[in-house]
């Protein structure tokens, strides 16, 4: 086992002082450039252009960026279903079917499948705008805490 190689791989990305970054920096970095295309009951459609900051080592859209988009856009769908709080993630799963490269326009469609008093279940699909080809699909389950009576 190459312990030093593993350590270098993980720590090489951690060369900045993250504690000095602005609050919610990660979401801002990923979400910058997102455009809301449609909002209707139980559904939100957004789009974005894949930029170099969102690419991984293989020069295609980083799966972590996809996970962040999925979290943020599906959470917004809770509001379209009458939810008053976006809650806390319990489970996120993503299946990847294709890659997206720099300068490709991507559409994200999030649907609120169920928004109850305590749990929300959401689905998300990522498509290439030019072809409609699905690049990823995901589901997001969220816990919706009951409001405090204090």
Image: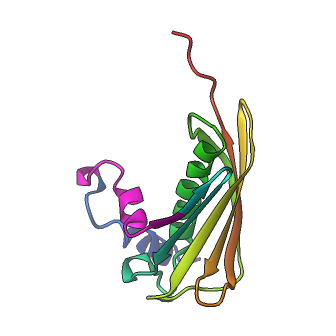
Q: Residue at x 31, y 48 (%)?
A: 23
Q: Between 117 and 36, which is closer to the camera in this rendering?
A: 36
Q: Is residue 34 left or right of residue 38?
A: left
Count of picture labels = 0
Q: Residue at x 59, y 89 (%)?
A: 130
Q: Quadrant of residue 127?
A: bottom right
The magenta region covers: 19-37
Measuring from the top left, give residue 5's x and y in whole percent: 47, 78
Q: Quadrant of residue 29?
A: bottom left
Q: How is the image coloured?
A: rainbow
- Relative height, residue 97 to residue 26 (above, below): below
119 falls in the magenta region: no
The quadrant of the image that shows the N terminus is: bottom right
Q: Residue at x 47, y 74 (%)?
A: 48
Q: Between 85 and 53, which is closer to the camera in this rendering?
A: 85
Measuring from the top left, give residue 20's x and y in whole percent: 23, 52
Q: Residue furthest left?
A: 20
Q: Residue furthest top?
A: 150
Q: Is residue 5 left or right of residue 113?
A: left
Q: Residue at x 45, y 75 (%)?
A: 9
Q: Is residue 134 left or right of residue 39?
A: right
Measuring from the top left, give residue 138's x and y in whole percent: 70, 64
Measuring from the top left, give residue 125's x and y in whole percent: 68, 69
- Relative height, residue 149 to residue 51 (above, below): above
Q: Between 119 and 38, which is closer to the camera in this rendering?
A: 38
Q: Quadrant of residue 40?
A: bottom right
- Relative height, residue 37 to residue 27 (above, below): below
């Amino acid at each position: 086992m190459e312990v030093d190689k593993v350590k270098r791989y993980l720590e090489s990305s951690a060369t900045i002082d993250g504690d000095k970054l602005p609050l919610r920096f990660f979401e801002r970095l990923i979400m910058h450039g997102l455009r809301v295309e449609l909002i209707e009951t139980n559904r939100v459609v957004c789009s974005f252009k894949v930029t170099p900051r969102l690419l991984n080592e293989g020069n295609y859209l980083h799966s972590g960026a996809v996970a962040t988009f999925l979290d943020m856009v599906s959470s917004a769908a809770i509001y379209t279903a009458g939810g008053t709080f976006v809650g806390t993630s319990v489970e996120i799963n993503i299946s990847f079917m294709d890659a997206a490269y720099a300068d490709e326009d991507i559409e994200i469609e999030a649907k609120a499948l169920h928004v109850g008093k305590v749990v929300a279940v959401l689905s998300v699909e990522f498509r290439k705008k030019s072809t409609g080809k699905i690049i990823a699909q995901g589901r997001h389950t969220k816990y919706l805490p009951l409001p405090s009576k204090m």
